[in-house]
Image (spheres, grey):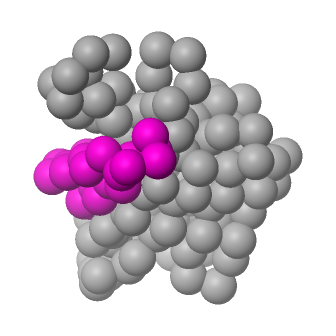
Amino acid sequence: MTGNDGITESYRRLALNYAFAVDRRDGAALAACFAPDGELAGTRMVRTGDQIAEIPAIHAKTYVRVRHEVVNQSCTPLPDGRFKGETYCNASHLFHPEIEANTILVMAIRYEDDLVRVGDGLRFARRRLHLDWQEKRSVLPPG
């Protein structure tokens, strides 16, 4: 990575890899987005290490599908060689029919990220999830 464009590209790729890992229920890919001592903090939870890899399985108990749309991002270098980032995301969660049939929960999420350089890319040292708002609504059944 060279210059700010390389950092921006690496951060975008990291955020997309995170979203794909959650959506595809791939715990190993999700954990790979974090530095070895990385942390994910959100409303009422903090996860580290192997706990991060368990998140997709936890979602699978409640939701048939989860779909993240990564939108705005900014990334700022810090004097110590680390980076501060912010990512906006809309995450749709389709409930299992026996929990709430034909219902989705859409969350407007803002992530505050502390990033470290690992090899030729970035990893999350700490990712803080802020729920700006949420909406629950009925949808047509899938299929």
User: Does residue 21 appear anywhere in the picture?
Assistant: no
Q: Position of residue 47 (x, y in %)?
A: 73, 63
Q: Position of residue 86 (x, y in %)?
A: 29, 58
Residue 44: x and y in percent read: 64, 85
In this image, 70 relative to 114: left or right?
A: left
Foreground residue, 19 or 14?
14
Q: Which residue appears at 33% of the width and 68% of the height?
A: 109
Magenta stretch bounds: 67-91
Q: Quadrant of the C terminus?
A: top left
- Relative to 19, is 86 above or below? below
Dominant SS type (magenta)? strand
Quarter of the figure with residue 22: top right
- Is 22 drawn above or below residue 112 in the view shown? above
In-front residue for pair 60/26: 26
Horizontal relation, residue 54 to residue 73: left or right: right
* Image quarter of residue 9: top left
Q: Nearer the viewer, residue 60 or 71?
A: 71
Q: Residue furthest front?
A: 79
16 magenta-colored: no
Report the residue that reaches farthest toward the right: 50
Q: Is residue 83 magenta?
A: yes
Measured as percent of width and height from the top left, residue 82 is found at 45, 45
Residue located 70% across and 71% down the image: 46
- Of residues 136 and 7, the one drawn nearer to the viewer in this rendering: 7
Q: Residue at x 52, y 40 (%)?
A: 116
Quadrant position of the N terminus in the picture: top left
**Where is 10 relative to 56, above or below?**
above
Residue 53 visible, this orientation = yes
